[in-house]
Image (cartoon, helix red, strand yellow):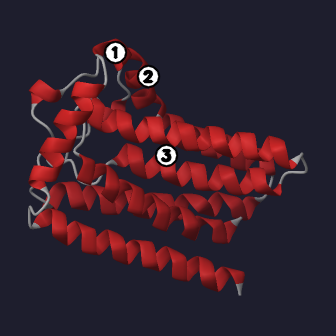
Protein backbone atom coordinates (compact mmCIF):
# COMPACT_ATOMS: atom_id res chain seq x y z
CA UNK A 1 0.00 0.00 0.00
CA UNK A 2 2.88 2.34 0.81
CA UNK A 3 4.39 1.74 -2.65
CA UNK A 4 1.03 2.54 -4.25
CA UNK A 5 0.95 5.97 -2.59
CA UNK A 6 4.55 6.63 -3.59
CA UNK A 7 3.64 6.01 -7.23
CA UNK A 8 0.51 8.17 -6.96
CA UNK A 9 2.46 11.01 -5.32
CA UNK A 10 5.14 10.79 -7.99
CA UNK A 11 2.54 10.92 -10.76
CA UNK A 12 0.80 13.92 -9.17
CA UNK A 13 4.02 15.93 -9.10
CA UNK A 14 4.79 14.85 -12.67
CA UNK A 15 1.37 16.06 -13.82
CA UNK A 16 2.04 19.38 -12.06
CA UNK A 17 5.37 19.53 -13.91
CA UNK A 18 3.67 18.93 -17.28
CA UNK A 19 0.99 21.56 -16.60
CA UNK A 20 3.54 24.08 -15.38
CA UNK A 21 5.67 23.38 -18.47
CA UNK A 22 2.76 24.31 -20.72
CA UNK A 23 2.32 27.57 -18.78
CA UNK A 24 6.02 28.38 -19.22
CA UNK A 25 5.90 27.43 -22.90
CA UNK A 26 3.04 29.88 -23.43
CA UNK A 27 5.32 32.61 -21.96
CA UNK A 28 2.66 33.56 -19.40
CA UNK A 29 5.24 34.02 -16.63
CA UNK A 30 7.91 36.03 -18.44
CA UNK A 31 7.26 39.20 -16.44
CA UNK A 32 7.26 37.17 -13.21
CA UNK A 33 10.65 35.71 -14.18
CA UNK A 34 12.20 39.07 -14.97
CA UNK A 35 10.79 40.99 -12.00
CA UNK A 36 11.64 38.27 -9.48
CA UNK A 37 15.20 37.92 -10.79
CA UNK A 38 15.81 41.68 -10.67
CA UNK A 39 14.41 42.00 -7.15
CA UNK A 40 16.38 39.01 -5.86
CA UNK A 41 19.66 40.21 -7.35
CA UNK A 42 19.07 43.70 -5.95
CA UNK A 43 18.63 42.26 -2.44
CA UNK A 44 21.60 39.86 -2.52
CA UNK A 45 24.96 41.62 -2.38
CA UNK A 46 27.76 40.71 -4.78
CA UNK A 47 29.89 39.81 -1.76
CA UNK A 48 27.89 36.56 -1.51
CA UNK A 49 28.47 35.58 -5.14
CA UNK A 50 31.51 33.38 -4.40
CA UNK A 51 29.66 31.55 -1.62
CA UNK A 52 26.62 30.97 -3.83
CA UNK A 53 28.84 29.98 -6.76
CA UNK A 54 30.26 27.24 -4.55
CA UNK A 55 26.73 25.88 -4.19
CA UNK A 56 26.55 25.86 -7.97
CA UNK A 57 29.44 23.39 -7.96
CA UNK A 58 27.83 21.26 -5.24
CA UNK A 59 24.68 20.94 -7.34
CA UNK A 60 26.55 19.69 -10.39
CA UNK A 61 25.79 16.23 -11.75
CA UNK A 62 29.26 14.93 -10.91
CA UNK A 63 29.05 15.84 -7.20
CA UNK A 64 25.48 14.80 -6.42
CA UNK A 65 25.53 11.62 -8.51
CA UNK A 66 28.82 10.65 -6.86
CA UNK A 67 27.41 11.39 -3.41
CA UNK A 68 24.34 9.24 -4.04
CA UNK A 69 26.52 6.44 -5.40
CA UNK A 70 28.63 6.28 -2.23
CA UNK A 71 25.57 6.52 0.02
CA UNK A 72 23.95 3.59 -1.78
CA UNK A 73 27.24 1.69 -1.80
CA UNK A 74 27.46 2.13 1.96
CA UNK A 75 23.96 0.62 2.35
CA UNK A 76 25.16 -2.61 0.67
CA UNK A 77 21.80 -3.27 -0.97
CA UNK A 78 22.01 -3.96 -4.71
CA UNK A 79 18.36 -3.02 -5.31
CA UNK A 80 19.06 0.49 -4.00
CA UNK A 81 21.20 1.25 -7.07
CA UNK A 82 17.96 1.25 -9.08
CA UNK A 83 17.31 4.78 -7.76
CA UNK A 84 19.51 5.93 -10.63
CA UNK A 85 16.81 4.84 -13.10
CA UNK A 86 14.32 7.60 -12.06
CA UNK A 87 17.25 10.04 -11.84
CA UNK A 88 18.36 9.18 -15.38
CA UNK A 89 14.76 9.43 -16.60
CA UNK A 90 14.40 12.88 -15.04
CA UNK A 91 17.60 14.04 -16.74
CA UNK A 92 16.36 12.74 -20.09
CA UNK A 93 13.17 14.78 -19.60
CA UNK A 94 15.33 17.77 -18.63
CA UNK A 95 17.43 17.48 -21.80
CA UNK A 96 14.32 17.05 -23.97
CA UNK A 97 12.77 20.12 -22.36
CA UNK A 98 15.89 22.20 -22.89
CA UNK A 99 16.17 21.01 -26.49
CA UNK A 100 12.57 21.46 -27.61
CA UNK A 101 11.36 24.48 -25.60
CA UNK A 102 12.20 28.01 -26.62
CA UNK A 103 12.98 29.37 -23.18
CA UNK A 104 16.36 31.16 -23.18
CA UNK A 105 18.03 31.68 -19.82
CA UNK A 106 18.75 35.10 -18.29
CA UNK A 107 20.93 37.36 -20.46
CA UNK A 108 24.63 37.68 -19.64
CA UNK A 109 24.15 40.94 -17.71
CA UNK A 110 22.46 38.88 -14.95
CA UNK A 111 25.29 36.35 -14.76
CA UNK A 112 27.18 36.47 -11.42
CA UNK A 113 28.92 33.10 -11.15
CA UNK A 114 32.52 34.07 -10.33
CA UNK A 115 34.52 30.86 -9.79
CA UNK A 116 37.05 29.81 -12.42
CA UNK A 117 36.27 26.09 -12.12
CA UNK A 118 33.43 24.32 -13.92
CA UNK A 119 32.56 20.63 -14.16
CA UNK A 120 32.24 19.15 -17.68
CA UNK A 121 28.44 18.81 -17.30
CA UNK A 122 28.22 22.61 -17.06
CA UNK A 123 29.30 22.90 -20.68
CA UNK A 124 26.27 20.94 -21.90
CA UNK A 125 23.95 23.65 -23.18
CA UNK A 126 20.99 22.21 -25.19
CA UNK A 127 19.70 25.72 -25.95
CA UNK A 128 17.11 26.42 -23.27
CA UNK A 129 17.21 26.84 -19.50
CA UNK A 130 14.00 25.03 -18.54
CA UNK A 131 13.96 23.08 -16.28
CA UNK A 132 16.88 23.65 -13.91
CA UNK A 133 19.03 20.54 -13.59
CA UNK A 134 20.62 21.76 -10.36
CA UNK A 135 17.18 22.16 -8.77
CA UNK A 136 16.12 18.73 -9.99
CA UNK A 137 19.24 17.04 -8.58
CA UNK A 138 19.32 18.73 -5.19
CA UNK A 139 15.64 17.93 -4.54
CA UNK A 140 16.11 14.33 -5.71
CA UNK A 141 19.21 13.82 -3.54
CA UNK A 142 17.55 15.46 -0.52
CA UNK A 143 14.56 13.11 -0.71
CA UNK A 144 16.84 10.07 -0.83
CA UNK A 145 19.10 11.31 1.98
CA UNK A 146 16.14 12.37 4.15
CA UNK A 147 14.58 8.92 3.81
CA UNK A 148 17.84 7.18 4.75
CA UNK A 149 18.30 9.50 7.75
CA UNK A 150 14.73 8.79 8.90
CA UNK A 151 15.53 5.07 8.99
CA UNK A 152 18.79 5.44 10.93
CA UNK A 153 18.91 4.38 14.58
CA UNK A 154 19.84 7.78 16.00
CA UNK A 155 18.09 10.27 18.24
CA UNK A 156 15.10 12.09 16.77
CA UNK A 157 16.70 15.46 17.52
CA UNK A 158 19.76 14.53 15.46
CA UNK A 159 17.50 13.36 12.63
CA UNK A 160 15.66 16.67 12.81
CA UNK A 161 18.90 18.66 12.69
CA UNK A 162 20.17 16.72 9.66
CA UNK A 163 16.92 17.21 7.77
CA UNK A 164 16.74 20.88 8.79
CA UNK A 165 20.27 21.33 7.42
CA UNK A 166 19.16 19.70 4.17
CA UNK A 167 16.26 22.17 3.92
CA UNK A 168 18.65 25.09 4.35
CA UNK A 169 20.98 23.69 1.68
CA UNK A 170 17.99 23.29 -0.64
CA UNK A 171 16.84 26.86 -0.05
CA UNK A 172 20.32 28.31 -0.67
CA UNK A 173 20.81 26.15 -3.76
CA UNK A 174 17.49 27.18 -5.30
CA UNK A 175 18.00 30.85 -4.53
CA UNK A 176 21.54 30.72 -5.95
CA UNK A 177 20.20 29.54 -9.32
CA UNK A 178 18.35 32.84 -9.66
CA UNK A 179 20.70 35.22 -7.84
CA UNK A 180 23.66 34.06 -9.96
CA UNK A 181 21.63 34.67 -13.10
CA UNK A 182 21.91 31.07 -14.27
CA UNK A 183 18.17 30.35 -14.30
CA UNK A 184 14.82 32.08 -14.21
CA UNK A 185 12.48 31.35 -11.26
CA UNK A 186 10.25 29.23 -13.53
CA UNK A 187 13.26 27.05 -14.42
CA UNK A 188 13.81 26.42 -10.72
CA UNK A 189 10.14 25.63 -10.06
CA UNK A 190 10.09 23.21 -12.98
CA UNK A 191 13.25 21.52 -11.69
CA UNK A 192 11.77 21.22 -8.20
CA UNK A 193 8.59 19.55 -9.50
CA UNK A 194 10.60 17.12 -11.63
CA UNK A 195 12.93 16.41 -8.70
CA UNK A 196 9.99 15.70 -6.40
CA UNK A 197 8.40 13.35 -8.91
CA UNK A 198 11.57 11.35 -9.64
CA UNK A 199 12.80 11.42 -6.04
CA UNK A 200 9.56 10.04 -4.61
CA UNK A 201 9.49 7.36 -7.31
CA UNK A 202 13.07 6.39 -6.41
CA UNK A 203 11.96 5.61 -2.85
CA UNK A 204 10.35 2.46 -4.24
CA UNK A 205 13.84 0.94 -4.47
CA UNK A 206 14.83 1.81 -0.91
Say which label, 3 or 1, has the lower sequence index: 1
Query: Residue 177, percent across and down?
Result: 32, 37
Is any part of residue 193 visible from this angle? yes
Query: Residue 5, percent across and down?
Result: 61, 82
Question: According to the image, label 3 marks what residue?
Answer: 138
> Residue, x 45% and y 58% (percent of image)?
195
Numbered-mark total? 3
Picture quadrant of residue 95: bottom left
The local secondary structure at tag 1 comes to: loop
Question: According to the image, label 1 marks what residue?
Answer: 115
Say which label, 2 or 3, has the lower sequence index: 2
The local secondary structure at tag 3 comes to: helix
Is any part of residue 60 visible from this angle? no
Position of residue 74 in the picture relative to residue 48 (left or right): right
Position of residue 195 in the picture relative to residue 181 (left or right): right
Q: Residues within 10 Å of mark 2 (few under 14, many from 20)?
A: some
Question: According to the image, label 2 marks what residue?
Answer: 54
Residues at circles 2 and 1 in contact by the CB criterion of under 8 Å? yes
Q: Residues within 10 Å of mark 3 (few under 14, many from 20)?
A: many
Query: Residue 159, percent across and down?
Result: 78, 46
Amino acid sequence: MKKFWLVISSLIFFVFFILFTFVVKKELLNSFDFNTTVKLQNHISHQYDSFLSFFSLIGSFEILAGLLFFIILFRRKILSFLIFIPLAGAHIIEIIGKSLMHHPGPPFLFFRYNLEFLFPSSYVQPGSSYPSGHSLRVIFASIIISYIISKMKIKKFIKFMFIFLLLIINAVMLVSRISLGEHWPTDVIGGVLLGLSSGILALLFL
